[in-house]
Image (spheres, rainbow, N blue to C red):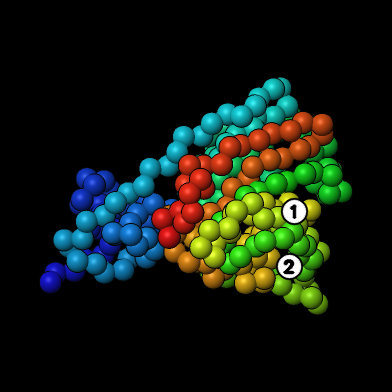
Amino acid sequence: MAEEKAYKVLAEQEGISNSKAKDLIDKGLVYAGNRKVVIARGNVSVKTKFRVEKVEKIRVIYENKNVIVLDKPAFLSSEEIEKKYPDAKLLHRLDRETSGVLVLCKEEDFREKAIEEFKHHRVYKEYVAWVDGDVIEEFEIDKPILTEKKNNKAYSKISASKGKPAHTTVSPMMVVNHKSKIKLVIREGRTHQIRVHLRSENLPIMGDEVYGGRRAKRVMLHATKMEILGMTFSSPEPKEFKHIGGGG
């Protein structure tokens, strides 16, 4: 059976350019059956039928002269979103497949104040996730994290000797068939902190294949709430979080 590069087959199927097809695969939006296509240059049958997931629209949660707070959809990087708002700068980042509350600052004085709040751990950050395993009581994860670059991508791990302090509180919300929906509150916000901490407890996030999670529609992690400088911003759970599995 004839084969061709995945991005070329996708480009032909969708009537788009090769570069656009590569971009869709790199963003994790392309599926063959129930399997995510992860290598754009991998060979597939020329008869492969792809499914392309749509990216949800960016929703404005709140805006004033100092900030614009967005409900970030999965599959868009924080930097891509920042480019859509040229008069604002990111205050913090969410991973590409993580959705939820994302704050951009419009005034530099406010941004500097907000950064100080982060530095002194005076920002409340709450997330929800689906993980493999049974979480039936609240517990703390207090393990230092070291972040390194691998192939131009950040990768974090627990390192008692070289890591920076990182603390995560994990609380149960629901358990279904040895999968748990949990609430997470983080103090610091190291790169991939929640993902690495949960993996270290044998509770990988569903969809987080980088850190040992089973395949799912996306990384099942959502930023539900942030409290900073007397303001509270919230984002409702995405629809795929309402039912267990997220396509996994």
Query: Which residue is at the far top?
Result: 65
**Mark closest to the chain's N terminus, 2 or 1:** 2
Q: Nearer the viewer, residue 191 or 131?
A: 131
Report the amino acid beneath label 2. Answer: Ile
Q: Nearer the viewer, mark 2 or mark 1?
A: 1
Look at 53% across and 58% down and name the residue there: 176
Residue count near mark 2 (Cα–Cα under 10 Å), binned few <14, some 14–19, many ≥20 = many
> Spatial distance from mark 2 to mark 1, Cα to Cα?
13 Å
Q: Position of residue 79 (x, y in %)?
A: 57, 45
Q: Nearer the viewer, residue 91 or 52?
A: 52
Query: Which residue is at the far left?
Result: 1
Left or right, 227 with reference to 71: right
Look at 76% across and 62% down and name the residue there: 139
Residue 35 seen by the camera: yes
Q: Which residue is mark 2?
A: 145
Q: Position of residue 173 (x, y in %)?
A: 64, 51
**Numbered label attached to residue 186:** 1
